[in-house]
Image (cartoon, rainbow, N blue to C red):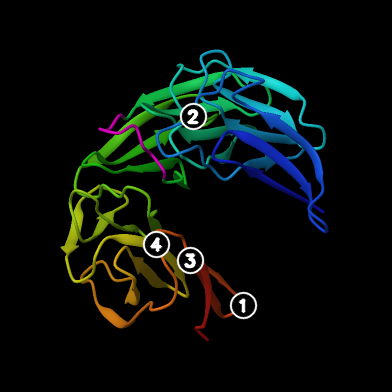
Amino acid sequence: NKLYMLTGYGVIVCMNAKNGDLIWTLDTQNELDGKNLQWGLTENLLIENEKLFCAVGGQEYNIIAVNKDTGKLIWVSKGLGDLAAYCSPIILNRAGKKVLVTMMASHIQGHDVETGEMLWSYEQPNRWSVHANTPIYDGDAIACVSGYGKGTVKLNLNKTGTAVTKVWFNESMDNRMGGAVKIGNYLYASGDKNRGWHCVNWQTGESKYHDKSLANGVVITADNMLYIYTDRGELALVNANPDAFKIVSKTKVEIGTMQHWAHPVINDGKLYLRHGKSLIVYNIK
């Protein structure tokens, strides 16, 4: 019965889900040494048992874990001192060891969930220090996608998650903030500098296609199909086929204002779409 959020000014908020009353707050910039970013802090906060994790981006308080019920610090990691990078983290389970993986301004990092110890890092900078895509984990590997011309890297994890090695790097798939999806043996995402839609072989990093039929945007998946929402306001259904980018159907989003950058959500046969001041619901059964 609690809701958690991180404000654009770096305040972690815990609220009563029924009435919105504040339960606790933690100002990561005034109480800790967190740093704000050019476009304001944002990440989806992650909870594991009693711990809530947040990339604060300070020199001393770089990544933190707090008690989800009280907001009190459980552990602090100095990391490498990178600023936060808009990335929502994930937790991996490797031979019983849980590892928090996130992308900071210049590095992909793995931290021990219990202690905060940084287990490994991999350098992955781009022009604007923005890495807004959640890492993708499957099998023994993670893939991290970065925009502004950087690209996608696949890293293999050792059995305990305490080290990584690079498997391949693909410069073409350089999505900025629309996410990527893995279906079968392939990754699908739009580019950024490399405009259009890309499909990459998960095992080899080989590019299968680069198609410019739609503008760049967000991709999610359901029923083995790609649901695409472009930055020009196009909503499209596309076959998840590595051999060709085939549009099944599309429409134009006519309601709302401002940027077409929100991530859609599918639940129970409905697709929910935020566009500026409007929330739109499509029946997709």
Sequence-earlier tag: 2 or 3: 2
Percent position (x, y) of residue 201?
27, 54
Mark identifier at residue 268: 1
Q: Identify the residue position indicated by label 2 in the image.
A: 36
Residue at 46% in and 39% down: 86
Task: Measure the C-alpha gap from mark 1 to mark 2.
Answer: 37 Å
Highlighted range, magenta: 125-132
Which secondary structure lies at badge 3? Answer: loop
Disc 4 marks which amino acid?
Met
Q: Please tell me in which quadrant of the rendered image residue 111 appears.
A: top right
Q: Is residue 96 visible from the viewing direction of this image?
A: no
Decide: marks 4, 2 in contact (CB < 8 A)? no
User: How packed is label 1: few (under 14 Cα within 10 Å), some, or many (20 or more)?
Assistant: few
State how far apart marks 1 and 3 are (Cα): 13 Å
User: What distance separates the C-alpha of mark 4 from that of mark 2?
Assistant: 23 Å
For marks 4 and 2 on the same chain, the one whose residue lies earlier in the sequence? 2
Judged by depth in the image, the label closer to the viewer, 4 or 2, is 4
Which of labels 4 and 1 is toward the front? Answer: 4
Q: How many marks on residues? A: 4
Q: Which mark is residue 264?
A: 3
- The residue carrying pointer 3 sits among few (fewer than 14), some (14 to 19) or many (20 or more) residues within 10 Å by Cα, namely some
The foreground one among 134 and 39 is 39
3D distance between C-alphas at marks 2 and 3:
26 Å
26 up-or-down from 180: above or below: above
